[in-house]
Amino acid sequence: MAVKLRMRRMGSNKRPFYRIVAADSRFQRDGRFLEILGYYDPKMEPFKFEIKREKVLDWLSKGAQMSQTVESLLRREGIVQEFNTAKANAKSSSKPAKKETKKETKN
């Protein structure tokens, strides 16, 4: 199952707001979803954006992909950078030390 973090449109005509959800990529834009992660209201001045940071990081660590819009919002909040540094730290700490092996020669 390919999970995407994307926006689900809510609200009435000409008054949209969006929920940030984790959804299977095969589901419709406003259809079924797995979990609500936050919301974005572009009509507020300044715009209102709230996100559940830990849940987003959890989904990203499980391999979820972000839509372009969600990625730009998460970059603004610093969540993408936090995920990338955590991923780099985990990668560098999990590398095993190289062992020296002696090659035996046959006579």
Image (tube, rainbow, N blue to C red):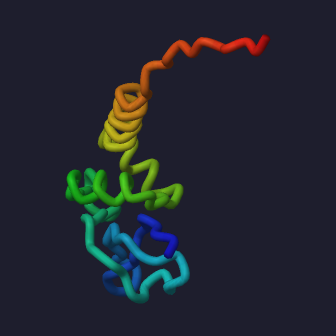
Q: Is residue 105 above or below residue 80?
A: above
Residue 6 image offset from top left, x and y in percent: 43, 67
Vertical relation: 94 (above or below) 42: above
- Left or right, 21 with respect to 6, comes to left
Question: Where residue 55 sits in the image (x, y, percent)?
Answer: 24, 59
Residue drawn at x 31%, y 71% is: 19
Where residue 62 sits: x, y (%)? 38, 58
Q: Is residue 22 left or right of residue 46?
A: right
Residue for point 50% across, 76% down: 1
Q: Residue at x 29, y 56 (%)?
A: 58
Question: Quick check: 18 left or right of 65?
Answer: left
Which corner quadrant of the image does residue 43 belong to?
A: bottom left
Query: What residue do we see at 34% from left, 61% from top?
Result: 42
Q: In the visual, does 28 lie left or right of 46? A: right
Image location (x, y in percent) of residue 105: 73, 12
Residues 53 and 72: in front is: 53
